[in-house]
C-alpha cells in the first residue's frame, strides 16, 4: 500500500494509470468469450453482468451450473483478464479437477485428513489476479486485510475516516468498510467479519514457499492446500485434469511470482521473517 502511494500518489491515480478505463458491456462480453476459449471451457460457465455486486466478481453453482457474476464497475481494461484468471482459471478449474479426485466429497476430505483449502485457494486466485500485470501490486488484498484488522477496534464511521489516507473515493471506501463490518448488528461498536484477511494470508504463504511448490500438481489435485501436495501426489487421478494456460510454463510462472515479490518491496528474508 505504501509502495503504491509513493509511486502513484493515490489509489485513484493508480487505478486509472494501471487499470485503464471501465469497459462497456460489449467489450466485457468479448473479453470473457476470448478468455473462455483460452481455457477451453466455452459453454461450461454461465456469465452474468451486474451493477450491484459488493465484490469484483463471484463464482457460484446455480441450478447445477457454474455461474460467474461480474461487477461492471470493476471491469477495467487491463484488470479484467486478471479477474477471469482468478475466478475461472483458478476457482473453476481447480473445482473441475477436484471433482475427479477421491477427496471430492466432505467425507473424502475427512478420510484423507486434508487441511482446509484456504488460505491456499484464495491466495493462489489473488496472485493470479495480478500475475501478468506490468506492475503487480497487491493493493486490494493488503487493503482488505488492513481494513479488517482495524475494524476489530473501530466503529464503522471511524474506520471509514481512517482508511481515507489510502482511498479518497467515498463510494469505494464504503464498500471496503461494508465488507469488513458485514454481519455486525451494531456497527458503532468494534467488530469485524474476518474472511477478507484470507487473500493476503494465502498470498504470503504461497510466495514464501513458491520455490518448493509443484504448482501444476497443486492445480491438478483440486481444492487442496499446498501443504498436502506431497501426501496426495501418489493418489492423484490425472486423466482429464486441466491446467490453466498461464501455468503451463512453470519456469515463466515462477518468474512472474518473483516479479510480484520484488514489485511489492518484499524479499525472501522478509517472507521468512513473517512466516518462519
Image (cartoon, helix red, strand yellow):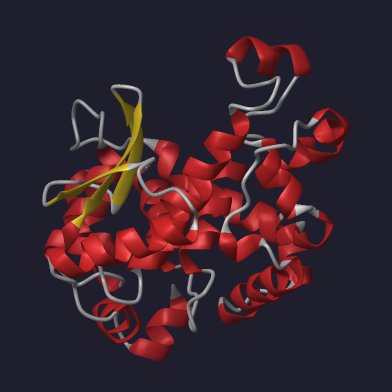
As rendered, which of 150 and 77 lies closer to the eye? 77
**Quadrant position of residue 270:** bottom right
Q: x, y percentage for residue 170? A: 13, 64
Q: x, y percentage for residue 100? A: 64, 27
Q: Is residue 273 visible?
A: no
Q: x, y percentage for residue 72? A: 17, 59
**Residue at (13% x, 69% y) in the render:** 24
As rendered, which of 117 and 151 lies closer to the eye? 117
**Residue at (17% x, 62% y) in the render:** 73
Q: Is residue 121 left or right of residue 171?
A: right
**Residue at (36% x, 53% y) in the render:** 147
**Residue at (60% x, 79% y) in the render:** 265
Vertical order, 102 against 67 (above or below): above
Q: Is residue 254 left or right of residue 263?
A: right
* The N terminus, quarter of image: bottom left
Vertical order, 223 against 123 (above or below): above
Q: x, y percentage for residue 105? A: 59, 16
Q: Is residue 96 visible?
A: yes
Vertical order, 34 against 125 (above or below): below
As rendered, which of 55 and 72 lies closer to the eye? 72
Q: How many marks?
A: 0
**Quadrant position of residue 212:** bottom right
Amino acid at each position: 500500500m505504501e509502495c503504491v502511494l509513493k509511486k502513484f500518489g493515490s489509489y485513484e491515480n493508480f487505478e486509472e494509470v494501471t487499470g485503464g478505463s471501465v469497459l462497456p458491456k460489449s467489450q466485457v462480453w468479448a473479453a470473457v468469450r476470448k478468455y473462455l476459449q483460452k481455457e477451453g471451457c466455452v459453454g461450461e460457465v454461465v456469465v452474468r453482468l451486474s451493477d450491484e455486486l459488493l465484490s469484483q466478481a463471484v463464482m457460484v453453482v446455480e441450478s447445477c451450473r457454474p455461474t460467474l457474476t461480474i461487477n461492471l464497475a470493476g471491469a477495467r481494461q487491463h484488470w479484467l483478464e486478471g479477474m477471469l484468471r482468478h475466478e475461472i482459471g483458478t476457482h473453476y478449474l481447480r473445482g473441475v479437477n477436484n471433482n475427479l479426485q477421491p477427496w471430492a466429497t466432505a467425507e473424502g476430505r475427512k478420510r484423507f485428513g486434508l487441511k482446509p483449502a484456504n488460505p491456499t485457494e484464495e491466495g493462489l486466485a489473488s496472485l493470479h489476479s495480478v500475475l501478468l500485470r506490468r506492475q503487480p501490486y497487491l493493493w486490494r488484498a493488503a487493503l482488505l486485510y488492513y481494513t479488517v484488522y482495524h475494524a476489530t477496534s473501530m466503529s464503522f464511521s471511524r474506520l471509514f475516516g481512517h482508511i481515507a489516507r489510502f482511498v479518497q473515493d467515498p463510494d469505494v471506501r464504503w464498500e471496503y468498510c461494508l465488507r469488513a463490518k458485514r454481519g455486525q448488528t451494531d456497527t458503532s461498536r468494534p467488530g469485524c467479519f474476518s474472511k477478507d484477511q484470507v487473500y493476503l494470508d494465502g498470498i504470503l504463504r504461497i510466495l514464501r514457499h513458491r520455490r518448493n511448490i509443484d504448482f501444476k500438481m497443486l492445480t491438478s489435485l483440486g481444492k487442496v492446500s499446498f501443504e498436502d501436495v506431497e501426501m496426495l501426489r501418489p493418489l492423484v487421478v490425472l486423466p482429464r485434469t486441466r491446467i490453466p494456460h498461464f501455468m503451463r510454463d512453470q519456469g515463466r510462472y515462477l518468474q512472474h511470482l518473483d516479479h510480484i515479490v520484488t514489485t511489492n518491496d518484499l524479499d525472501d528474508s522478509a517472507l521468512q521473517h513473517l512466516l518462519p
